[in-house]
Image (tube, helix red, strand yellow):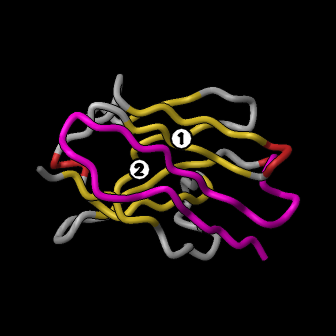
Amino acid sequence: QVQLVESGGGLVQPGGSLRLSCAASGSIFSTNAMGWYRKAPGKQRELVAHITNGGSTNYADSVKGRFTISRDNAKNTVYLQLTSLKPEDTAVYYCNRLSSTGLYWPWGPGTQVTVSS
């Protein structure tokens, strides 16, 4: 069973940057498209970026040009570089595989990103 552990969150001022990491156990990581998701209080979880196993990327309009997703299959790790952060980016960030059927691996603990002055 795949286990996911996110890290790298924190408190940052508007305009600041963070780099999130997600380490995955299991050899099936490299064959799956991976996504970064976030959930803000009172809102539904949303997909903010995804990367295929071949490295193609896609972003939600709200983060396009500010966030960059990448992966290192040798390390079973996916990253999310966050720049030009805004208060509305405040959320718990999670990684998981990309799914069109709603079937996800067990969710990790997430990492809290708080953007505030």
Answer above or below: position of 15 versus 109: above
Which quarter of the figure is the N terminus placed in?
bottom right
Q: Residue furthest left?
A: 117
**In the picture, residue 99 is in which quadrant?**
bottom right
Which label belongs to residue 50?
1
Q: Residues within 10 Å of mark 1 (few under 14, many from 20)?
A: many
Q: Tell me if residue 9 is in the magenta stretch.
A: yes
Q: List x then y, in percent, for residue 100.
A: 54, 53
Q: Residues within 10 Å of mark 2 (few under 14, many from 20)?
A: some
Residue type highlighted by circle 2: Leu
Residue at the spot x=79%, y=66% of the render?
25
On the image, numbered disc 2 is attached to which residue?
A: 47
Q: In the depicted view, which residue is nearer to us: 67 or 61?
A: 67
Per the image, label 2 sits on a secondary structure element best described as: strand
How many numbered marks appear? 2
Residue at the spot x=61%, y=76% of the render?
106
Residue type highlighted by circle 1: His
Which label belongs to residue 92?
none
Q: Residue furthest top?
A: 65
Q: List x then y, in percent, for residue 115.
A: 21, 51
Residue at the spot x=29%, y=57% of the render?
11
**Highlighted range, magenta:** 1-30
Q: Tell me if residue 10 is in the magenta stretch.
A: yes
Apparent side of residue 41 relative to residue 117 in the rendered image (left or right): right
Distance between the alpha carbons at the discs numbered 1 and 2:
8 Å
Badge 1 vs badge 2, beta-carbon distance below 8 Å: yes
Per the image, label 1 sits on a secondary structure element best described as: strand
Q: List x then y, in percent, for residue 91.
A: 29, 60
Q: List x then y, in percent, for residue 48.
A: 39, 44
